[in-house]
Amino acid sequence: MKKLPIHLKIVIGLVLGVIWAILSSYMGWSKFNIDWIKPFGTIFINLLKLIAVPLVLFSIIKGVISLSDIKRLGKMGIKTLSAYLITTFIAVGIGLALVNIYMPGKWASEEQLTDNRISYELWAKQENVELKDGKCFLCDDQYKERVASIQSRTASTQISTDVLEKIKVAQQRKNDGPLQFVVDMVPSNIFVSLNDNGLMLQVIFFALFFGTVVLSIPDEKTTGIVSFVEGANEVFLKMVDVVMKGAPFFVFALLAGTVSEMAGNNPANVVEIFKALAHYSIVLLAGLAFMVFVFYPGLVMVIVKKLNYRQFFKKIGAAQLLAFTTSSSAATLPVTMECVTDNLKISPKTANFVLPIGATVNMDGTSLYQAVAVVFLAQFHMVDLSIGQQLTIVLTATLASIGSAAVPSAGLIMMILVLQSVGLNPAWIGIIMTVDRPLDMCRTVVNVTGDITVATLVANSEGDMNVDEE
């Protein structure tokens, strides 16, 4: 067992957690899971949340500071960053379009969806989170018995009328101006923002602002700052490694507790959960496949006349396969650079600048996944996200992808931040973790293919590409 790679151990933990939850449901042990096993999953979530904000802060600052070459390369830097941001926005947009059209979270039974909604409202009450959509199942007498049943197995606090007050506040928010979300991005006190994961956009804004200002100051005056940022970033990345060593056990506890909490002692509810997950996986894979097989090669064929569809995939296949195997853009980077320089005949000058930046800031697959997953989880809990909230998802997923480390499981941390940015329960990641590992492999293929596409487009515009015609 010790020789197994960590991702296989996590898969084993996930499978065992689900199996245990199903057996517990049959045996009537769901409350035992919730009382004695789920707390370890909660610890896992808390550890990830502990690391998330400082990791994003220092990763983004480091990423911006590392772009000092942009002064020398000029237009190439602007083209690179613009292309990465545009493709990421498009990826998130495609994900939102698919998940809103197909609505995978609605494929569970009405009874399961209602129970999920009640659980969400109980969590929102306990955590003092505003209900954003104006619904209130807790206020409806017809759900009294179901609320009591769900309350008893989730050990939630007693219901009070202040839920209605939260709904009133949510209604008042609808009267805010169209640019209120822009105002909310700019912090008045960064220490307050760092203390609240729900203010992640403010942390990202500060990191971008701070990094940009550091670049404008002579290097000899910022040596200490740069060293501190780089060192702190390495520390938090190491903390992720340490936490992930215990991930197999933690995800077992998280899955066992989450499924037991949702299904109770009714095994039929487990079937409803996985039916919805199957539809979620279909939507996500459709979006990822569109990016890899339609969007990226389409861009290349339209802009780079010398490359056709078959050539493009033949020349980058090795990088895509390694990305699928490792689930890591960083681990794939050496092969990616080899494919780009040797097969696509892009000059090392361009490849060495564009690709490392892409491995850090370009996470199209991760951003698309976050958009689909958040809306799916909202649908699965009967939470209607407004256009403003979905715009927040677009911004948070796009900007947070800049701070996503190019290693497996980094998207998990970003998912927590995106969920919190629209007032949803971060523990819901336990639901999608059941199918996350194979989907993570597919997301990494999208990330790496996106890096190669942008490198190809930038090299073509700079005249640094001499691909052989076949």
Image (cartoon, rainbow, N blue to C red):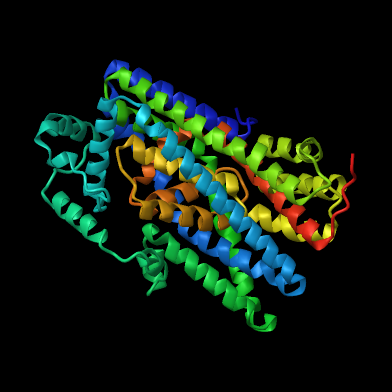
Q: How many marks?
A: 0
Q: Check the picture and name the quadrant holding the C terminus.
A: top right
Query: Does residue 43 sit above or below 227 in this rendering?
Result: above
> Which residue sits at x=78%, y=50%?
304
Task: Please state the horizontal and vertical placement of residue 294, each as a whole percent of the image.
Answer: 65, 39
357 versus 131 height, above or below: below
Vertical comparison of 468 with 30: above or below:
below
Compare residues 51 and 289 and report the one nearer the observer: 289
Left/right of residue 1 with respect to residue 73 in the rendered view: left
Q: Residue at x 28, y 27 (%)?
A: 112
Residue 42 screen position, x and y as percent: 37, 42
Q: Is residue 135 left or right of residue 58?
A: left
Q: Is residue 230 left or right of residue 146?
A: right
Q: Position of residue 102 (x, y in %)?
A: 43, 33
The residue located at (19%, 52%) in the rendering is: 167
Compared to residue 365, the image places residue 106 above or below, namely: above
Q: Is residue 163 left or right of residue 275?
A: left
Q: Residue at x 35, y 64 (%)?
A: 178
Quadrant of the frame with the N terminus: top right
Could you tell me if residue 413 is visible in this image? Answer: yes
Q: For residue 323, which quarter of the picture? A: top right
Instruction: Specify whether residue 49 is in view.
Output: no
**At which x and y percent is residue 163?**
16, 49
The outermost residue toward the top is: 26
Of residues 408 and 462, the one drawn nearer to the viewer in this rendering? 462
Task: Judge by depth and name the residue closer to the eye, 431 or 457.
Answer: 457
